[in-house]
Image (cartoon, helix red, strand yellow):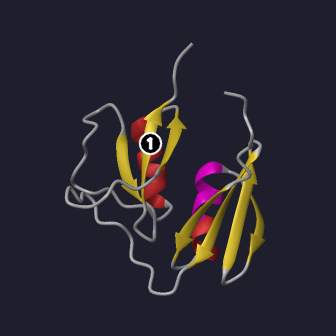
Amino acid sequence: MTATADLAMVNLDSSDPAAHAAFYHRALGWEITHSEAEYAMISGGGASIGFGLVEGYQPPAWPDPAGQKRYHLDLYVDDLAVAEKEFVAAGASKPEFQPGGDRWVVLLDPIGQPFCLCPRPQG
């Protein structure tokens, strides 16, 4: 199939776009390119992530076997243990349920959205 589109960016619902962007700015090192109460954006590595205010936003439950599968971010890291400590220090939390065993780590960002830390492929 011939590509008919290019990914412009990913937008995430948020209860606090500016704080949400600040967390991922710190986590990824990407530049905050826009920050207001209603919408914020970070950019880096040829991509952007936007954070849009949704009144009454409720984060997904984790785990939620009865719920529908949602998207989440997977982030490559060089050292799972070190990255976990740094993300928690930046405001993330680690839920008890960890389906990856020692293969990856699930964390919740400051507004409760799950994301995964994955070992960077070697070679």
Quarter occupied by residue 114: bottom left
Looking at the image, which is closer to me, 35 or 9?
9
Residue type of the residue flagged with mark 1: Leu
Taking the magenta stretch, the answer to whether it contains residue 104 is no
Looking at the image, which is closer to me, 29 or 106?
106
Measuring from the top left, give residue 39's x and y in whole percent.
68, 76
> Which element is circle 1 on?
strand
Quarter occupied by residue 82: top left
Say above or below: 122 vs 52.
above
Is residue 55 shown left or right of residue 98? Answer: right
Is residue 123 shown left or right of residue 110? Answer: right
Q: Residues within 10 Å of mark 1 (few under 14, many from 20)?
A: many
Residue indicated by mark 1: 117
Check the picture and name the quadrant holding the C terminus: top right
Q: Residue at x 66, y 27 (%)?
A: 1
Magenta part of the protein: which range?
23-28
Q: How many marks?
A: 1
Measuring from the top left, give residue 96's x and y in whole percent.
21, 54
Is residue 2 shown left or right of residue 75? Answer: right
Q: Residue at x 51, y 79 (%)?
A: 15
Measuring from the top left, give residue 57's x and y in whole percent.
45, 80
Looking at the image, which is closer to me, 64 or 74?
64
Would you say the magenta stretch is mainly helix, strand or loop? helix
Q: Residue at x 36, y 61 (%)?
A: 93
Q: Residue at x 77, y 43 (%)?
A: 46
Measuring from the top left, give residue 6's x and y in whole percent.
74, 43
Is residue 5 shown left or right of residue 51? Answer: right
Say above or below: 31 vs 3.
below
Say above or below: 18 vs 6.
below
